[in-house]
Amino acid sequence: MSTPIRLDPLGPSGDYPAKDKLDVKDVSGNHIAELGLVPKLFVTRALSALRKAKPLPFDERARAIAEAGELFATADVGGASVEEYQHAACRVSGLPISVIRTATRSIAHRAANVRRGVEAARPQGAVADWRDPLTRTGRAVWVRRGEVFAVHASGAHPGGHGHWLEALALGYRVVVRPNQREPFTAHRLVSALRAAGFGADQVVWLPTEHEAGAAILRGADLAYGGDDVVRRFAPDPAIRSQDPGRSKILVTADADWREHLDTIADSVAHHGGAGCVNATAVLVEGDPGPLAEALAERLAALPARKPEEEDAVLPVQALGSARAVESFLRTRAEDAKPWLGGDGIAHDLGDGSAALRPAVHQVDRPDAPQIELELPFPCVWVAPWERRRGVEALRDTLTLTAITGDDELFDELVSEPTISNLHRGDHPTYWTDIGLPHDGYLVDFLMRTKAVIRG
């Protein structure tokens, strides 16, 4: 058994040798890392140090973030090579190694393009600095809504860490509270940022228990994240909660779903089906049975492997956890028709872990309660949809792929405020690009405009 990886908190004065520690285990129950925890008092002092620190100039911040992304993806950082990091993150999260590698590249890509990302969200009529000559005759100036930004990482997918880099680029000092399930990504990214030129009082990495985690939220000016600590503070306007995605696909009668089956299956299973942008419901105008049957056949072919194996495509959990997910699914499926996964989804890998195999169920109406259910593996509910029902069943959706030629319907979907992202045609639900919003622009939460005129 190898020596557990030591993960010390990264405070405003450097590494902190914490007395309280938490064992981090992999999906087989092996002790893989020792996570140092900071107390509430340390959090209070760290936030004070961040608030007193002055941000680097914008050009220096953008350059350092880009350099940090390159280090994150290629170099030895925080005592680990990129291969060692990816293996550890894969084993504790249960996500396939290919997903971790893709997330590594995605974070580096977002870091390299952070300037373009924040500029895309700046209001067209605003300037970024009061010194801009346009303020002499009066102009909107884009300014931060605070100084300290807190990130409570959800741990669902490592790629999410690429988003909060925009806060750092805008001059916020950032405190990251990692998810105890997968702390490696955040530790590596903060270490890379410090190696690239950010001072220890600009970005910190503070693992905590819940009480100290709540102190981070209370002490920061703005915060976001997806764990239970964040949700306890809702609906605080200074705290943005990452809710489930409930991403969906709609296929109307004028489209042949057979021509789009690859995109539909990929939207469900891409990156192990664990992301908020993975499709968890497919609504079909007409009989949904043939699509559900074909989708089940396609997903049934996915292999069950240990997460570090090269051909792994499905998420893995500890065997007990996987069986609990399986039991929960059976309870919630109720009278839904199982096309795949009805006899169980926990595939025992023989080492104390289990792969979560795909599940496809058919429900009899678009407002069935299962449509809102999101689970961390390829699990999809297929339902009938009728044009007369309008967009009601499509609300509260992070990303909707609408396979339709109906312009009037698409107008309604674009206008629906609870659909965050909309793809028309053969575009998977997980597609995105630099400069496009995820659940709206994070920058809209971080920044505001104020009128400035000077002589």
Image (cartoon, rainbow, N blue to C red):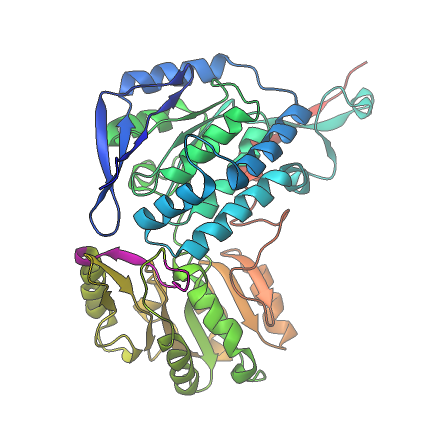
Q: Residue 194: in sight, yes or no? A: yes
User: Which residue is more in the foreground, 273 or 224?
Assistant: 273
Q: Does the magenta-highlighted stretch encompass residue 245?
A: no
Q: Residue 155: in sight, yes or no? A: no
- Tell me the residue at 54%/22% (across/down): 198
User: Which residue is more in the foreground, 314 or 411?
Assistant: 314
User: Which residue is more in the foreground, 56 or 383?
Assistant: 56
Q: How many marks?
A: 0
Rendered location of residue 67, percent (x, y): 60, 32
Residue 182, picture quadrant = top left
Task: Work out which quarter of the rendered image holds the N terminus and state it.
Answer: top left
- Tell me the residue at 51%/49% (across/down): 439
Give the left or right position of residue 24, taking residue 254 as reference.
left
The magenta stretch is 309-320
Q: Does the magenta-highlighted stretch encompass residue 318?
A: yes
Rendered location of residue 172, percent (x, y): 53, 25
The answer to whether residue 173 is above or below residue 350 is above
Task: Work out which quarter of the rendered image holds the C terminus and state it.
Answer: top right
Residue 393, picture quadrant = bottom left
Give the left or right position of residue 81, taking residue 21 as reference.
right
The answer to whether residue 344 is above or below residue 155 is below
Rendered location of residue 203, percent (x, y): 47, 24
User: Which residue is more in the foreground, 217 or 321?
Assistant: 321
Give the left or right position of residue 67, taking residue 141 as reference.
left
The answer to whether residue 290 is above or below residue 420 is below
Q: Residue furthest front?
A: 1
Rendered location of residue 157, percent (x, y): 41, 49
